[in-house]
Image (cartoon, helix red, strand yellow):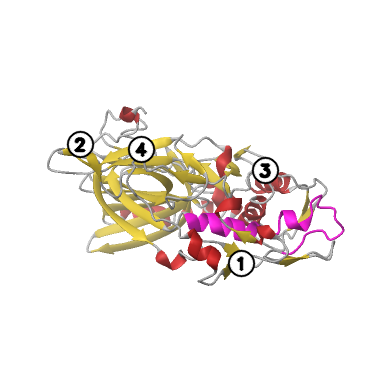
Amino acid sequence: MNLSLQRPIIGSGNSAIVTFPDFNIKDVDIKVKYAELKGFVNSGYAIRVQLSNADFRLLTILTGQNSDYFYKCRQIPIRIIIKFSQSPNATYPQGMTRDIEGYLLALYSHGEHQNDLVEFIAIDPVNFALRAGDADGKAYKGNVSDVIKQIINKYAPNAKLELEDQTNDSKYNVWWTFRRSPREMLSHLITIASSLSPNKTPWIIGVYNNTIKIGPQNSKQSKNVGFYTKISREERGEIESWKSILNTSIGQETMGLITAGVSATTGKYLDQITHKDATINEWNTDKKLITKTHTRDLRSPIKPYDTFSAGIYGRSYVESHPEYHNGGESGLDYSNYYDSYARTKFIRNTYKLLTIDLKVHGHGIYDNTLGLGIDTVFIDWTDLLYPDSSYYFHGSWLVYGFKHTWTMNGRWFTELNLARTDDNALGVKVPT
């Protein structure tokens, strides 16, 4: 493990560099007051920037009588590019992000006395295109992975799509959008795809600028992208603060979810009595990614399997989606894919049981969502005086979200959203 490439460089002279390629803003003294970039698994990323100057000159340029902002923004996407850096000589990925591009959604302005503050909100180019669909109600022909490709190619033609697996349903299927937006249709398809690929793990969407990657969770090699130590009297670590949640409210759902469905093709009723896979649990989701704790001591909750099998507590139910193509042209029996809603929810809940939000000094490796839900970080939470003694947060965690924040006082921090599975969960342990 090359730790030098996975620890942020804590430098001086932090900066947030913001550019607007579509505007020629000159002769205006503009200051970046606040900058934010946040990303989440399956959700792309969003940019928020606050700019200030005196005498409202920036606001006049953008919205005044001779401005072309409102003219342009209803014709073409308006671009914003942001970059975070620890110092003038910083390099990616330890001390600097790469250029991150977004398309503007909104402009907010407010002020005090003679100073105005203009706030820009933007999202990544791919999700901007997918959320601006035409609600055409089209029917697409092909298996699920082919239809995913068709939707991306139609609504985000400039995107570079990397489809990392194929679903095993028939290429003669027909999928109706039912007036969904392209983004909603895509979310629907990746949920169904979780039961239509060999390892039956949730499909994940990741983006960086105009690149979009879609595929099952375990189709991509998980890697460790961060190494962080606690701040202590003995050394200066990278961790500034943290907050953790043990979400007992979904504890029962992480034990198992039950689903059921009726097949019009075969006349079968599929439920926990007639079909063993109607209960989604650890044994039929054993290809999901789970995290290593790297210690013999208990560092995660334990699932009470005996209690669940004895039926002492109740069960949670998730309805199935309807059977597609009742003539049998899907190429699969309904029993092969009716559990996709419950399967996706069960695995996603697995990563909500124990979470931690970790605030570290700005780390440039998080400038995209391509590895979220797959990659891990390592938290070194040991006692320097007693190296064999580790604390609860020690070990690997799955990364599912991040947020960079920069303020005028030159402070750049990265907040990471991390998850850890039950210690006795079944799956593929990462990092390998």
Residue type marked 3: Pro
Q: Which residues are magenta?
A: 322-350
Q: Position of residue 202 (x, y in %)?
A: 58, 50
Position of residue 417 in the picture relative to residue 170 (left or right): left
Of the two numbered discs 3 and 4 in the rendering, the one whose residue sits closer to the viewer = 3
Q: Is residue 302 in the magenta section?
A: no
Q: Amino acid at mark 4?
A: Gly
Dot 3 or dot 4: first in sequence order is: 3
Pinpoint residue 106: horizontal percent, then vertical percent.
Answer: 45, 58
**Residue at the spot of label 3:** 198
Residue at 42% across, 55% down: 121
Image marks 2 and 3: residues in contact by CB distance under 8 Å: no
Where the N terminus falls, by quadrant? Answer: top left
The extreme left residue here reads: 233
For marks 2 and 3, the one nearer the N-term is 2
- For discs 1 and 2, the disc positioned in front in the rendered view: 1
**In what element is the residue under mark 4?**
strand
Label placed on residue 226: 4
Question: Residue flagged by tag 1: what amino acid is it?
Answer: Val
Instruction: Determine crowd level at label 4: few under 14, some 14-19, many 20+ residues with C-alpha closer than 10 A.
Output: many
